[in-house]
Amino acid sequence: MTTPALLRVRDLKTYFVTEQGRGTARAVDDVSFDLYPGETLGIVGESGCGKTVTSLSILRLVPEPPGHILPGSLIEFEGRNLLALPAPELRAVRGNQIAMIFQEPMTSLNPVFTVGDQIGEAAIIHQHLSRKAARARAIEMLKLVGIPDPDERVDDYPHQLSGGMRQRVMIAMALVCHPKVLIADEPTTALDVTIQAQILELLDRLQRELGMAVLLITHDLGVVAGHADRVVVMYAGRVVENAETTELFERPTHPYTEGLLAAVPRIDTPRARLHAIPGQVPAATAWPVGCRFHPRCPYAWDKCVAQEPPLLETGVAGHTARCWLVTEPERRPAKR
Amino acid sequence: MTLATWFALLVAIILAAETVRALRQRALGSERWRRFFRHPTAAWGLVILVFLIMVAVAAPLIAPFDPDRQLDIIGLKNHPPSWTFPLGTDVLSRDVWSRIVYGARVSLGIGGLGALVAVSVGSLVGAVAGYYRRWVDAVLMRTVDVGLALPRIFILLMAVALWDRLPFGVLVLVIGLTSWFGTGRLVRAEVLSLRERDYVLAARALGAGAGGVIFRHVLPNAAAPIIVSAALGVGNVLLLEASLSYLGIGVRPPTPSWGNMIADGAPNIYTAPWTTLAAGLAISLVVMSLNAVADGLRDALDPREEGSTT
C-alpha cells in the first residue's frame, strides 16, 4: 500500500506488575501493525492473547497501576505519538479522532442517564454543542444506527433497551464525532448470532458511509472472514501472523492460525468432531521460552524450543509469520 | 392560643397536604416520581416535613406568644397543656408551642445546612479519594481516620473558645465540617467499585476528563448511599445540636432550639414532662420523616427499579 498508515503501532509492550511480586505479566509484548485509512483490520486470538490490552493501550486506557506501557513503544496517529501526548491533547483525540466500542453493551452504558444524554456527551465535549444541539445530534445518530422511533428512544434509559439496541447505542456514541478510527473490541461477543450479523452489517455500512478505519478485535474467525481486509493473529502477547484475509484463509502458515481455522465449524463438510488446539494459553507471567506456541504446536522441534523466530516473510506480499516452518517448509506434513 | 393562630395552624396543615397532593398529581406524568409516591410512607414523611418547614417560615403567624416572653413566672410556671397553652409552659413560664414553632427555624436550619455542608464535603472528598486512589486516597483517608478519632465535642469546644458566642453561620460550618467523615468513607467505598465499571471506561474512551467522569458518571451512580447518608445526617446534626445546646455551647438561650428546649425541661422531667417531650417528639418526627422520604427517593432515583413498572 502506498498511502501512509493512519495508525502505526510499533514495538508496543504493555506489562502488568502482579501483586505479591509474582512477576510481571507481559500481556502485550512487542506488537507492531499498521492501520490504513478506510480499511478493516482484524485482530484475532484466543482469550488471554493480549488483544484487548492492545486496543486499550492505543488510547492509553490501560489501568495504571498495575499496568504500564514500556518506553520504546510507539503508537503513532497521523504523525503524533499518542504515548507522548499530554493528557488534555490525548482527551481531544479520544472519542473525537479515535473512538472505541466495547464488548459488553449491558454494562458499558451509564444506567442513570438517558441514551440521548450519553450519545450527546462526546459532541458536547469535543464540538462544544449546546444541550439542545447535542440532543438533535443524538436523534440523528440513533437514526443512522437504525433504531426505530429515534425521537422517542432518545429519552429511554439503557435498561429499557435490548442488548442489540444497546450495542447500536454504543456505536452511535462512538461515531458522534465521526472519528477516523473505530476500535471495536469484540463488539458482538455478548450478542446472539442474528443480532451479531446485524451489528456487523451496520458497522460495514457505517464504515463505507463515513470512510473510517476499523480495528476489529475478535476471537471469531468467521467474523474476520466476512468483514476484515487484513488480519493480525496474536498469540501470547505477540503477533504470530499477518496477512490479507483471503490469503490467510487460503494459506495459513503459522500452526496456531491453522489450528484456529480447523476449529471453525464448516457448513460444507460432513459433520465431525471439531478440532481443538490442545492445552491453553500459558500465563502471561511465564511465557514459554523459544517459540511461545511450541508447547501446543504439533510440528515443534528442538529449534522451536531453543530460539523464538522473528516475523518471517512468506513470499506473498504482506504475509508474514512467526514460525520456523517458513524457513524449513519440508517439516510440515503434507496436507490431506 | 387565639382563634387566629389555630386558624393559621389549620391553614398550614391543609397547605402541606395540598402541596404534596399537587406534587403527586404532577408526578403521574413521570415514572420516576410515581415510584416515589408508591412508597408506603414517603408521602406521609413529605407532608410532615413540608408542614414543619411551613411552620418554621410562618412562625410569627402560627405562634400565639413571643417565644422568649416569660408570661407569669409565678402563676404559669410548668403549666400543663391546656387550650391556651396547647403544649403547656416551661419552667420560666414560656409557651412551649411557641418555642417549638420558633425552634423549628433554628433546628431545621442548622440540621439542613449542616447536613448539606457535611454531605457535600464528604461526597467530594470520598469521590476524589476513590477515583484517584494511591497517595491522594491515603492522605484523605488518614485525615478521615483522624477526624473520626477526635471527639467532635472537643473540636467544637475549641471553636467555642475562638468565638465567645458562636454565630449561626459558624455553628453550621463547624457542625458540617466535623460531620462529613462517615459520608466520605461511604462514598469512597462506593466510588472504588464504580470507577471500575465499563461505562466509566467508555466515558474515558470518549474523551471525558476526570471531573466529567466523577460528576457525571461516578457520583450520580452513588446517589442512593449519598441521599440516605444526607437524611441520616440531618438527624445526626439535629442530635448534635441538641447535645451542644445541652452543654450550653450550641444555640444560646433564650433563642429556642429543640435541643436547648430539651435541656431546659430536663430537670423537671418528672413533674412537667411536656416541656421535654414536645421537643423530643419534634426531633423524632423529623428524623423519621426524613428516613421515609430518603427511602422513597432511593426507590425513585434508582433506574434499575424502572423495569418493574408498566
Image (cartoon, coloured by chain):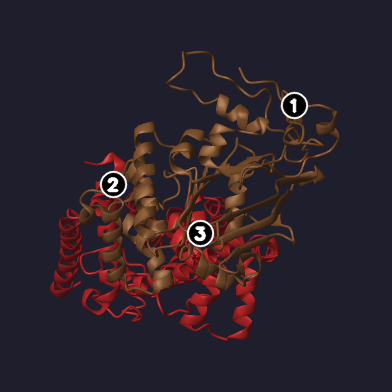
Q: CA distance from mark 2 to mark 3?
A: 39 Å
Discs 2/3, front: 3
* Disc 1 target residue: A330
The residue closer to the viewer here, A225 or B71, is A225
Amino acid type assigned to the residue bearing label 3 in the image: Ala
Task: Using a 10 Å C-alpha cutoff, classify the residue at mark 3 as few (fewer than 14 neighbours), some (14 to 19) or many (20 or more).
Answer: many
Horizontal side, residue B59 vs residue A92: left or right = left
Between A85 and A297, the one nearer to me in the picture? A297
- Chain where mark 2 sits: B
Which class describes the residues within 10 Å of circle 2: few (<14), some (14-19), or many (20+)? Answer: some
Near-viewer residue (B173 or B200): B200
Based on the displayed image, in which of its 4 quarters is residue B33 positioned?
A: bottom left
Q: Quadrant of residue B179?
A: bottom right
Q: Marks 2 and 1: in contact by CB < 8 Å?
A: no
Chain letter, brown: A
Residue type pointed to by label 2 = His
Residue B205, numbered circle: 3
Q: Are marks 1 and 3 in contact (CB under 8 Å)?
A: no
